[in-house]
Image (tube, helix red, strand yellow):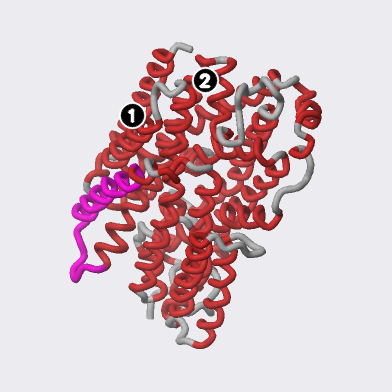
Amino acid sequence: MNHDITLGILFSFLVAFTVVAYFAKKNAPETGTSTESYVIGGRSMGTVVLLLSMGATYFSTWTLLGAFGTYYRSGVWFSSFAVWTIFHGIFVWLFGTRIWLAGKKFGFFTPGQMFQHYYSSKRLRIAVAIVGILALVPVMLIQISGGAQALESLTDGMVPYVIGVTVTSLMVGVIVLWAGFKGTAWTDSFMGLFFASILIFTAFYAADKAGGFALFEKALAHSPEKMVTGGNPLKMIELWLGLGFGAWVLPHMWQKYYSASSAEVLGKVAAMTPFWNSWMMAIIPLVVGTAAMIPGVVPGVTAATSDTILPQFFSAHLPVLGAFVVAGILAAAISTINSQLLSSASIVAEDIVNSLRKSPMTSINTVRVTKLAVIALTLLVFVLALTPGGAGFLIPIASLGFGLGLQIVPSALGILYFRSISEAGAFWGLITGASAMGISALLGLNFIVGHGLFGLIINVIVTVVISQKTQPVSQDSVAQYHNMYAAYMTDNVSTDDEVSDHIVPQK
């Protein structure tokens, strides 16, 4: 294999990636001074870019490496995990439109701002911020480690893991610092379309190498234990909840709702998301992961190396195209971590630093602090990726982040739907749920359900019990938010002026 070709293609894609970010920045010249523009794109995202951006956030290294490996290790039963994409589309509509409405009315650009405004609670705002950042760090980690693993595998170690981690981290920092939200959204879209094209070809090519329509029959002959319904149903339910019910509330997704130009845009995104995500996350990895079970299709693959099936496959059969694939995997990792990194940094600046100040920072200073946080968080993820555990199996690492995301759900639903949740209930539910999950994961405690779902159960119980015993949220807040939702949804308003007209004024 010609490694010079691989490196040349990789370099070309990084250049193309940078060019896309450049035009995004050029299209938003106010990015450097406006917090709203830098963090959420000036609330101007349309259907196509937002759909592709949301999709690229999910089918990055988590899907393009982790899912392939999980099918190989666990078998066809894992295809049921795609059910989450249906949940996710529903939740984008049920919850995302309400988040967009409140964000547009009150000028929010972080989740914590909305929590403090509704619950009148600075401590809850800070708690949500900390849990949100802790939830995103494992998800960011798999982007860095996954891309570096793929690059090392395809180049047969010529580009070692540490170099891949370094290149990815540098590109992430540069793009986010330079181009802001629009840069991340445009690069997400660019790489999403690229991967959609490459992976469709991959599925057909792998199937052909494995025997075409006889693929699953051959896999059954070689690995019958992987071709039957099995697995761990409770773990799968937790995965559905973590991805479908927990992912919508993660900070970078919350801010994508803020970024939409209208509720109609979110409605279209919600309708198309299940189709966009499910075939990319279930069908293609299923075909390739199953093909890898057949001897000779992916020579030398083992359970330990199964997270790099895709680059191994092309390295053996079509090295030139494999170079495109691994370059794309690396770029997809960058495009995905971009929005997560920007979201985490904006939370540090606004929900932690700014909320603790006696006088609020100006928009320019908030952007500056956000950029400093980008640098700090990039260094943190870089260091974590170089630790021994940083290169572990991708699906388990990601599950930690999505499980933490689940812990924000009860308090978020208090803002969006359930008027009976009090500030104390929301705060202590979040704290105990996140703590229960973290302790059980660190100690390796085994329950009937997984760590994330265990934490959520504790969270809900504490939230409900304490809410019944403590002072409810003020009637002003309840009316301002919940009556606003009812009026907006009932009258189907769509313009900025109508949004303002249908807000119930604060008493």
Mark 1 or 2: the one toward you = 2
Q: Secondary structure at mark 2?
A: helix
> Which residue lies under the disc numbered 2?
322
Neighbor class of circle 2 (other Cα within 10 Å; few <14, some 14-19, many 20+) is many
Q: Describe residue 475's horizontal placement relative to residue 167 as left or right.
A: right
Marks 1/2: CA–CA distance: 21 Å
> Which quarter shows the C terminus?
bottom left
> Which residue lies under the disc numbered 1?
18
Q: Secondary structure at mark 1?
A: helix
Identify the residue at image location x=71%, y=21%.
Answer: 210
Whether residue 326 is situated above or below residue 118 in the rendered picture: above
Q: Magenta region: which residues?
A: 356-382
Neighbor class of circle 1 (other Cα within 10 Å; few <14, some 14-19, many 20+) is some
In the foreground, 323 or 439? 439
Identify the residue at image location x=39%, y=24%.
Answer: 159
Q: Can see residue 97?
A: no
Which of pointers 1 and 2 lies earlier in the amino acid sequence?
1
Label 1 is placed on what type of residue?
Answer: Thr
Extreme residue toward the top, this view:
2
* Snapshot quadrant of residue 355: bottom left
Identify the residue at image location x=57%, y=65%.
Answer: 490
Residue 126, percent from left and from top: 35, 67
* Snapshot quadrant of residue 21: top left
Residue 245, percent from left and from top: 58, 58
Identify the residue at image location x=61%, y=26%.
Answer: 200
